[in-house]
Amino acid sequence: MDGQVVDDDKGMTLAGASTRSGGSGDANDRTGKVAASYVAGVRLADQAMQAGVTDVVFDRGGYPYHGRVKAFAEGARKGGLRF
């Protein structure tokens, strides 16, 4: 699972996080790939906040909103991003 915060006006990526980039954190009773997605969402939110971004549009790329996609979004919200 990958996520990016992109400034469409400037065509720049401001923040990015992936489950493949490792790292650990509190996954709130989640396990496996869902836990990794949640932690990646929190990491993305942290990077976005450092870049001064708090409001974003969540584009799930056509994937259903459940499982890893939902966990990623919940992690990003927990990190402080507003959709």
Image: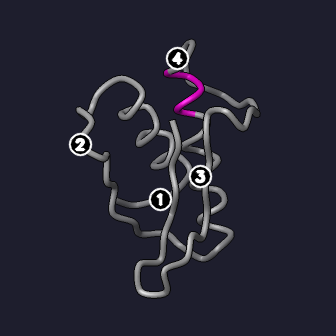
Q: What stretch of residues is rendered in magenta? A: 34-38
- Amino acid type, label 3: Leu
Number of the front mark, 1 or 3: 3
Residue identified by numbered label 2: 62
Q: What element carries label 2?
A: loop
Q: Relative to 65, is 33 above or below? A: above
Q: Which one is earlier in the sequence, the residue at label 1 or at label 2?
A: 2
Position of residue 10 measured from the top left corner of the image (x, y, whole percent): 49, 86
Say whether marks 1 and 3 touch (CB < 8 Å). yes
Position of residue 80 measured from the top left corner of the image (x, y, whole percent): 52, 56
The residue under the point 66% across, 60% down is 47
Report the side of 5 relative to 49 (left or right). Answer: left
- Amino acid type, label 1: Leu
Number of the front mark, 4 or 2: 2
Residue identified by numbered label 4: 30
Q: How far apart are marks 1 and 2 (CA)?
A: 21 Å
Q: Which one is earlier in the sequence, the residue at label 4 or at label 2?
A: 4
Residue identified by numbered label 3: 44
> What label does residue 81 carry, if any?
1
Main SS category, magenta section:
helix
Binning the other alpha carbons within 10 Å of mark 2 as few (below 14), some (14 to 19) or many (20 upward) gives few
Q: In which quarter of the image is the C terminus?
A: bottom left
Q: Which one is earlier in the sequence, the residue at label 2 or at label 3?
A: 3
